[in-house]
Image: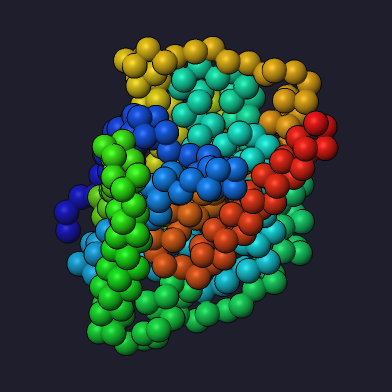
Amino acid sequence: MPVVDIPAIQATVVSATFAVCLLLGVIMQRSNFCTMGALADIVNMGDWTRMRMWLCAIGVAIAGTQLLAFAGLIDPGKSIYAAPSLTWLSYVLGGLMFGAGMVLASGCGSKTLLRIGGGSLKSVVVFCVLGLFAYMTMRGVFGVFRVAYLDPVAVDLANGQDLPRVIAGKDAGLLSTMRLVLGLGLGLGLVAFAFASREFRTADSMLGGLGIGLAIVAVWAISGSLGYVAEDPNTLEEKFVGTNSGRMESLSFVAPVAYALELVMLWSDKSRLLTLGIAAVLGLIAGSFAHALLSRQFRWEGFRGTEDTANHIVGAALMGVGGVTAMGCTVGQGLSGVSTLAIGSFIALAAIMAGGYLALRYQMWRVEAMA
């Protein structure tokens, strides 16, 4: 039996993820990718250009992820998104909270990291508050409530909640076929919808849509193939090396922020390791910082006043609690989760959009009321 070098695999997973997210940070900054901004463009101006970019990224992520699964390189059923327990109440409430929070905080978790790289000091505050409340919802006071009252409200789907498994059941041949049919059908359909608009067909928009979707696929391949060990020599069980969940992971920017804070606070604890999620957080900030310097767009930014500070702190807290409760953010559920075709990810994504829409309407009402 060949020797399995777990530390070497861990280093490969972490370094490869950092490299992908370094490039992703540049792409996101160059294309002005922002889910909250895309939603705001529709609500305020009726402009769908940035939303088409996001839908294109979702389409590429779905098609690429399902092709990897069809080829046998990864198994989406081994991710947190496709677990048999469909915790629908957590998805709905968490999604609504996260959606409202990202509007108050001027962007989701990924946008916060991008803004830190660009010189935003108020995004540093959002980062810390988001990470603190996310940790409290994973293992602290909010976590007790979540586990006791929200997560038990669930529907059990014995074969897993990703659509190919729901349809195919235990039929392996049909499962493979459904991955190809649903993956290419839904994925390429979304890409076609995006490219149908002339306004979308610009270099930056296409770079954002295609590049961000491919980054999701790349990290699935890193964790699900490069990081996969069929038999850990220590436990004699299969292992996904370098992930915080112990399962196959792609990109998400709520829980990894909490893990990044935990790592720096407990740095002397040698059991704490640099993981895929933390590498993604660092890579996104580094990529944004590099782009800001090269494009001469780096600017220090602070809060405008007390109300601006309060909005960002409350928004960050809502994103921390909501993102963990919904098991992901606009990237975690909206891209990574949806790419597995998990039913819960579609529910969470719809709730995030609804929460964001309601918060945007509230902001518009406040502006009109004060006029």
Placement of the C terminus among the 4 image quadrants = top right
Report which quarter residue 274 is drawn in. Answer: top left
Report which quarter residue 67 is drawn in. Answer: bottom left
Relative to 148, is 111 on the left or the right? Answer: left
Percent across and percent down for residue 255 are 55, 44
- Residue in the image at 53% along x and 48% along y: 46
- Residue in the image at 36% along x and 85% along y: 168
Percent across and percent down for residue 319 are 64, 43
Number of callouts? 0
Q: Which residue lies furthest to the right in this view?
A: 369
Percent across and percent down for residue 233 are 31, 54
Placement of the N terminus among the 4 image quadrants = bottom left
- Residue in the image at 34% along x and 45% along y: 200
The answer to whether 196 is drawn above or below residue 67 in the figure is above
- Residue in the image at 50% along x and 26% along y: 115
Q: Which residue lies furthest to the left in this view?
A: 2
Q: Which of 335 and 174 is in front in this view?
A: 335
